[in-house]
């Protein structure tokens, strides 16, 4: 056994340094700058005094409070709904594909073909397909089911975020599903066979064998999807309405406002978005830890 | 010394002569010795022109109509940089100033007016004054207050006009007859009630400056005139009329498209709704009316423009050069080219996809050019509204503070109610 099998302290630092440096400087630097600006530090207009004004203004002022709280509720709704629906769908589809005997490769390919499609393109596609004068509406009109664009239900650019949720579910289900397929394939099917021999039906096998085994990856994938959909900009900007408006869209609008005094609010909102996501993830992991200990 | 008196008289003549000669020398843009110097410094360079990119028609037009001439006659490469809203270019200049970039900036020229011009003037980030030093500036009627004041802010040579625009409406002659058209806001209200779900307007806000303009027209109409609104911003007058304005717009809501739950965000979205048959009216600011949108294939060929009898807000739009621009010379050449009579006569034509009005005064050009300019006006085609009616309905815009106040208040009082 050579003494070089385990890197020494210095070697470790040298090996990790490039990645850590990029992380610290670019990400950490950006984060630090955002925090400073959110506290009111704006050299361009001569503002050097730090304060929490931007945060209190966002949360409580007459100008921003309504936009913030409605945006928060809306963002939580679309993230939670998209994550839940895509998770359930992903489990179903992954199990189905896992159990097909023939054509597994084809089904897998079809399932994941939209992974490289950018979210922006997915949003535009949804608009073309689902708007009141879109492809689907023209189809129903040709079939005589609707007569004018306004007969077709409002699915995109609606105040409930249905269009946004549909777009996210379309994009994120394959994401979670592919991860699940990988996990399912790595589980030895001897558990499954043994359980079947002992007389377990599908639901029992699912609940006691498959589910516990896929839960760790399922949880990580869902949390990633939640965090992403909560902080993403393109789909709510494209497929959503002006009010209620998802938080990231409001943040960008504040940032590009001609009034430079709105910039601390924009930064504060971005920091709040990051904090909220961290909070949700933290709570969820804590609950899971509790559940494990109770088991 | 007997020639001394003669020498002194001669010297005085020479001095006065040189003073006269000085008055004949045209002023030059700051930092250059003369116009030839500008042309020379510009040759072989690239100019970065930041302009609103929300209209495909205008984008293609600019690349072809100015880009090729710049390249062939002046050796300048045009790099048109589209922005979703002019405020994005403003923010870029502001951010660069914040970062201490005092030269070699990314933005050479901005298509600008109104509150964006106001922002950069306030921050003292514009190069100038240069607008009256370029050769073709003699064709612009700087005595006209509509040119010399941009949203009430004195231009003072810090921006040069490109074209003029006036907000009015488009209808489809295949769907509606001209007799059924509303010609003022009361008739429009009656039309909306008789045709629920068939009208909407652009949401005032970022990229929706036409919507803000529309709301201002409503304000002019219900307050009985525009004279009281132009000039300096009057917050008391606004506080007096704003509640009635929001009530008026809210009164439409139940009969608007999508029951007023949402509004199209910009001109293109409204044109899409109009073309798809979801609403019956679109809006335009082009003097060529529906022409440019028809050329771009965005709306049906049967579309026509029309105007109300009053309160059609119009203004000039300009180009400005930031202080830290890398290539001021090429920007000056481009600004000068925009005012050239053949370019002005060209840009008004609907086939170009641009179709905005003239910035130069037709009376100041020589006879051949005058004929070209007049002909272009005649050739506007069916898609355009009657220029005489447009001129009669003209109203100026309000002070720059009005823009963001109306946008914010509309969102709070109309959209969210």
Image (tube, coloured by chain):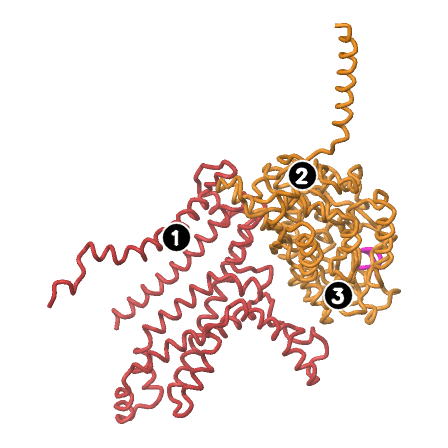
Q: Which mark is residue B295?
A: 3
Residue at the left extreme, as displayed? A1
B190 relative position to B83: left or right: right
Provide residue A235's location: percent of width, then percent of height: 53, 65
Compared with B54, A176 (above or below) is: below
Q: In the rendered image, which residue does mark 1 sit on?
A: A26
Provide residue B380's location: percent of width, then percent of height: 83, 59
Q: Colour of chain A?
A: red
Please give the chain letter of the residue carrying mark 1: A
Provide residue B306's location: percent of width, then percent of height: 83, 59
Q: Crowding at label 2, few (<14), some or many (≥20) Cα neighbours within 10 Å?
A: many
Q: In the rendered image, which residue does mark 2 sit on?
A: B158
Please give the chain letter of the residue carrying mark 3: B
Q: In the image, which residues are magenta?
A: B182-188
Visible residue check, residue A8: yes
Please tell me whether mark 2 sits on a helix, a strand or a loop: loop
Do callouts 2 and 3 point to residues on the same chain?
yes
């Amino acid at each position: 056994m050579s003494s070089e099998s385990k890197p020494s302290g210095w070697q470790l630092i040298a090996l990790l340094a490039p990645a850590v440096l990029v992380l610290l400087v670019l990400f950490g630097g950006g984060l630090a700058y955002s925090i400073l600006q959110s506290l009111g530090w704006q050299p361009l207009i001569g503002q050097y005094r730090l304060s929490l004004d931007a945060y209190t203004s966002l949360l409580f002022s007459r100008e921003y409070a309504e936009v913030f709280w409605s945006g928060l509720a809306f963002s939580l709704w679309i993230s939670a709904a998209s994550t839940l629906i895509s998770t359930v769908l992903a489990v179903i589809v992954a199990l189905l594909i896992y159990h097909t005997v023939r054509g597994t490769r084809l089904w897998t390919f079809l399932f994941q073909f939209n992974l490289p499609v950018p979210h922006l393109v997915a949003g535009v596609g949804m608009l073309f397909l689902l708007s009141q004068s879109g492809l689907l509406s023209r189809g129903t009109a040709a079939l005589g089911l609707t007569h004018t664009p306004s007969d077709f239900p409002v699915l995109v650019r609606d105040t409930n975020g249905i269009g946004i949720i549909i777009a996210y579910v379309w994009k994120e289900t394959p994401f979670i599903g592919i991860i699940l397929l990988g996990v399912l394939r790595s589980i030895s099917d001897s558990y499954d066979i043994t359980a079947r021999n002992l007389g377990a039906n599908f639901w029992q096998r699912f609940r006691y064998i498959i589910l516990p085994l896929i839960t760790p990856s399922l949880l990580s994938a869902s949390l990633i999807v939640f965090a992403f959909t909560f902080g993403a900009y393109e789909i709510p900007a494209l497929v959503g309405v002006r009010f209620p408006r998802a938080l990231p869209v409001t943040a960008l609008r504040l940032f590009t406002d001609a009034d430079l005094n709105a910039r601390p609010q924009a930064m504060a909102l971005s920091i709040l978005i990051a904090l909220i996501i961290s909070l949700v993830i933290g709570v969820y992991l804590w609950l899971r830890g509790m559940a494990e200990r109770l088991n | 010394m007997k020639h001394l008196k003669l020498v002194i008289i001669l010297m005085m003549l020479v001095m006065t002569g040189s003073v006269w000669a000085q008055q004949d020398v045209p002023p030059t843009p700051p930092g250059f010795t003369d116009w030839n110097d500008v042309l020379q410094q510009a040759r072989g360079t690239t100019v970065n022109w930041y302009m609103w990119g929300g209209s495909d028609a205008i984008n293609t037009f600019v690349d072809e109509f100015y880009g090729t001439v710049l390249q062939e006659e002046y050796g300048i490469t045009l790099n048109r940089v589209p922005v979703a809203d002019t405020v994005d270019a403003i923010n870029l200049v502001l951010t660069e100033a914040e970062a201490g970039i005092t030269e070699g900036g990314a933005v050479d020229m901005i298509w600008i007016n109104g509150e964006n011009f106001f922002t950069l003037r306030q921050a003292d980030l514009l190069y100038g004054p240069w607008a009256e030093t370029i050769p073709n500036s003699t064709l612009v009627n700087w005595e006209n207050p509509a040119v010399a004041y941009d949203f009430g802010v004195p231009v003072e040579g810090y921006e040069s006009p490109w074209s003029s625009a006036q907000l009015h409406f488009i209808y489809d002659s295949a769907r509606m007859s001209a007799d059924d058209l509303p010609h003022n806001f009361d008739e429009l209200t009656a039309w909306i009630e008789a045709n629920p779900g068939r009208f909407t307007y652009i949401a005032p806000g970022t990229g929706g400056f036409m919507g803000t303009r529309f709301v201002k027209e409503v304000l002019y109409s219900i307050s009985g005139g525009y004279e009281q609104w132009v000039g300096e911003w009057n917050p008391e007058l606004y506080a007096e009329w704003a509640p009635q304005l929001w009530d008026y717009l809210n009164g439409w809501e139940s009969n608007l498209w999508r029951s007023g739950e949402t509004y199209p965000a910009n001109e293109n979205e409204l044109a899409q709704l109009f073309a798809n048959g979801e609403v019956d009216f679109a809006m335009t600011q082009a003097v060529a009316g529906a022409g440019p949108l028809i050329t771009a294939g965005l709306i049906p060929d049967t579309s026509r423009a029309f105007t109300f009898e009053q309160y059609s807000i119009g203004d000039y739009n300009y180009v400005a050069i930031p202080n830290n621009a890398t290539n001021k010379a090429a920007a000056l050449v481009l600004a000068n080219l925009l005012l050239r009579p053949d370019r002005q006569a060209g840009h008004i034509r609907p086939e170009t996809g641009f179709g905005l009005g003239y910035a130069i005064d037709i009376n100041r050009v020589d006879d051949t050019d005058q004929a070209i300019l007049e002909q272009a006006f005649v050739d506007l085609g069916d898609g355009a509204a009657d220029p005489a009616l447009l001129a009669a309905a003209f109203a100026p815009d309000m002070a720059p503070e009005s823009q963001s106040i109306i946008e914010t208040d509309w969102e709070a009082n109309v959209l969210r109610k």
